[in-house]
Image (cartoon, rainbow, N blue to C red):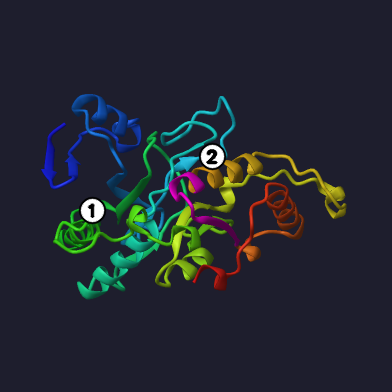
Amino acid sequence: MPSFVNQDVRLLKHDRSIVREDYLDNRWEEATGEMVDEVIFLSKHTAASNRPALTVHPIGVPHLKEGEQPPVGGKPAWAAPPNPRIGPWFRLLKSIADSQNLTPEFEVTLEATHHGPLTNAPTMFVEIGSTEEYWKRQDAAQAIALLVWEGLGLNGGAAVGDWSRCRSGSQQKILLGIGGGHYVPRHMDIVRKDGVWVGHLLAGYSLPMEDPGPTKAQANLEVCGTWRQAIRVAFDTTRAAFPQGEVLAHIDNKSFKGWQKNAIVGFLAEQNIKVGKPSDFY
């Protein structure tokens, strides 16, 4: 792969499917001896709507069962540590898109945690969507380039979203999103506010819960499915990405049926995972 250097940043240009580039961070370390602090994938985004979009999201498939074949990379019961820049860069990207008159034509949005490739370092995707017409848009590419330029402090300013320089890490709250659709609107409403940090965002499809039928009204109901595994993996990797921070689950209540919400809240309590209201993150 061709690679480029600017200060502490290494840019790699590859020609394979990005979700198959497993352990790119480890491979770089082995090839160069340089430790990788974080990974940012610049990628194309596809969506059934074909709507033009600029997106940011963490990666992983924590809900898949052992032995399942991930359709777009990763491995079952796995999620990469979410890059702490996700929240701050989402807000910076919105600001850049507004200033470049890309909005409202382009929607600036978060996406839920999904797909690979496998990495060990804190990781995020930044994407242009959603069809070839928009992938080729120079103004959209310029906005992403400016995001990287400013976000990593290559312009001489302070880097945006650098958790390691957050002096009051122990006082910071990190949002772990639970529920909602792929574009996590309820969680995104909170993240739009300055100062909010973001961990994994688990859409409803990443929380498989088997309907218990007539017994769903019972207390302490056992709800089968891999939803517990998904929450635990997402919480643990989010906590690892934000040393000394406090990870709070934010639940999209309207996206769950009563029995689902009761099961989730009960499991979070068992795991000593606190639930936060919107005001808790500001």
Q: Label 1, label 2: how many angstroms apart (C-alpha)?
A: 29 Å
Count of picture labels: 2
Between 145 and 73, the one nearer to me in the picture: 145
Height in image: 26 above or below 135? above
Q: Would you identify the image quadrant in which residue 97 lies?
A: bottom left
Name the residue beneath numbered marker 2: 62
The magenta region covers 239-251
Is residue 216 in view?
yes
- Numbered mark located on residue 135 in the image: 1
Between 210 and 200, the one nearer to me in the picture: 200
**Three-letter code for the amino acid on which mark 1 is drawn:** Trp
**Three-letter code for the amino acid on which mark 2 is drawn:** Pro
Q: Would you identify the image quadrant in which residue 142 lies?
A: bottom left
Residue found at x 35% / y 50%: 46
- Image x and y of residue 11, in percent: 18, 42
Query: Magenta segment: does it hold 250?
Result: yes
- Image x and y of residue 222, in percent: 80, 43
Between 22 and 183, the one nearer to me in the picture: 22
